[in-house]
């Protein structure tokens, strides 16, 4: 029978309507959240360099390092050589067992702006970077703090300038972006997609007036905010939280901004193995319970609508709806999703990830379900 002559049953018609509603909700989310990132106009930089310099606040860059000898040798110089009027770089050596201490001593002789804080063995009783970061912030002499990763490289020697110029009297928290360097392999591709989707959510929601997290490898805030909420003391027991629980505690719609200038981005080597990455994602679930209910609801929309979309598609095929209609729905979803990811990739300087976004999304639906089960098992254990 010609699919144009098909007459749906009441049940099929109801499911088709449900499918259309789910697709519409997902499209609305794409444009209302991700659209904030894609269509946000870049701030025009003032041509008066002198006035820019006067407006830039003194900044303390805090980097936690544990057995990062290789990265410090290779990348620390890019932080120390920043074209910035007044700044310091604080590296907290978290009881490293490699040659970090000696590498940092050598850099200290060459760069007066470098301050080294050494943590002796067994002092840090907590997992993660929060304890060393806290020591770095407490030892900072400036009121504006920037957190960066030891394995990261600034986009250029004006990275700090482009990030810090987002500070103002009203803007006290600046959410930056850290991408992964181009590397071959399926896992690195998945890692890039995950990093991109995470950024699309936290940047889009922050631009929508709902800041809930940032990227701990490239984030800036005023020091008094840190002490106002007691730093990380309330969640030291969790391995993560410096970039989401903390941001949730200090960020508001009015005091938070997003830095979308490519020159303010960092890049990382993506050193994780697949096993380490999965463990980190499980650790991230432990911070999720601290999110506001409204944020949990918004973040659940893409996953729930995608799950329902494919459930309805499979149901319609089982009910013998002509496949041409099903293909039409899938094409609409895929085209819009690829377009949104293409624009986001272009905005954040990422290539190729957008092509397979709809297929990778299916993988992450299964992965997230597995991780939630593993996290529940870990709790019981």
Image (cartoon, rainbow, N blue to C red):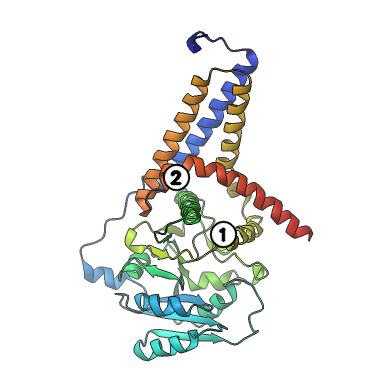
Q: Earlier in the sequence, mark 1 or mark 2?
A: 2
For the residues bearing labels 1 and 2, Cβ distance under 8 angstroms: no
Q: Secondary structure at mark 2?
A: helix
Q: How far apart, in angstroms, are the residues tagged by discs 1 and 2?
A: 27 Å
Quadrant where the C terminus sits is bottom right
Residue at which label 1 appears: 274
Q: Residue 40: x, y in percent? A: 36, 48
Q: Is residue 162 above or below residue 97?
A: above
Q: Nearer the viewer, residue 179 or 209?
A: 179
Q: Nearer the viewer, mark 1 or mark 2?
A: 1
Q: Is residue 243 above or below residue 57?
A: above
Image mark count: 2
Q: Quadrant of residue 181?
A: bottom left
Q: Residue 64: x, y in percent? A: 51, 76
* Other residues around mark 2 within 10 Å, as few (<14) / some (14–19) / many (≥20): many
Q: Residue furthest left?
A: 47
Residue 34 badge: 2
Q: Residue 264: x, y in percent? A: 36, 63
Q: Residue furthest front?
A: 185
* Other residues around mark 1 within 10 Å, as few (<14) / some (14–19) / many (≥20): few
Q: Residue 73: x, y in percent? A: 41, 80
Q: Is residue 135 above or below residue 177?
A: below
In the figure, is residue 50 to the left or right of 79? left
Can see residue 144? Answer: yes
């Amino acid at each position: 029978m010609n699919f144009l002559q098909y007459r749906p049953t009441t049940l099929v018609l109801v499911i088709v309507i449900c499918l259309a509603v789910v697709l519409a909700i997902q499209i609305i989310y794409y444009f209302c959240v991700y659209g904030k990132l894609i269509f946000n106009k870049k701030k025009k930089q003032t041509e008066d360099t002198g006035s820019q310099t006067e407006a830039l606040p003194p900044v303390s860059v805090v980097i936690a390092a544990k057995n990062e000898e290789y990265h410090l040798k290779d990348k620390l110089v890019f932080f120390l050589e920043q074209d910035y009027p007044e700044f310091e770089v604080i590296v907290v050596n978290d009881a490293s067992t490699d040659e970090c201490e000696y590498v940092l001593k050598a850099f200290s002789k060459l760069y007066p702006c470098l301050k080294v804080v050494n943590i002796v063995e067994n002092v840090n009783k907590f997992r993660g970077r929060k304890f060393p970061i806290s020591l770095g912030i407490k030892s900072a002499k400036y009121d504006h703090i920037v957190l960066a990763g030891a394995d990261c490289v600034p986009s250029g020697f004006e990275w700090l300038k482009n990030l810090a110029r987002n500070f103002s009297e009203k803007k006290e928290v600046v959410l930056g972006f850290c991408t992964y360097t181009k590397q071959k392999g399926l896992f690195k591709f998945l890692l890039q997609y995950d990093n991109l989707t995470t950024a699309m959510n936290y940047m889009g929601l922050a631009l929508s007036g709902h800041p809930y997290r940032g990227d701990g490898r490239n984030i800036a805030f005023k020091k008094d905010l840190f002490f106002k909420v007691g730093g990380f003391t309330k969640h030291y027991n969790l391995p993560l939280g410096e970039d989401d629980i903390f941001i949730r505690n200090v960020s508001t719609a009015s005091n938070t901004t997003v830095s979308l200038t490519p020159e303010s981005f960092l890049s990382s080597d993506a050193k994780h193995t697949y096993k380490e990455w999965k463990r980190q994602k499980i650790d991230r679930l432990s911070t999720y319970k601290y999110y506001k209910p409204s944020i949990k609801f918004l973040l659940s929309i893409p996953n729930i609508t995608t799950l329902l979309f494919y459930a309805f598609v499979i149901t319609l095929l089982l009910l013998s709806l002509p496949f041409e209609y099903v293909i039409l729905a899938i094409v609409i979803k895929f085209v819009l999703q690829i377009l949104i990811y293409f624009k986001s990739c272009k905005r954040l300087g990422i290539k190729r990830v957008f092509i397979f976004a709809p297929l990778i999304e299916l993988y992450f639906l299964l992965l997230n379900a597995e991780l939630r089960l593993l996290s529940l098992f870990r709790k019981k254990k």
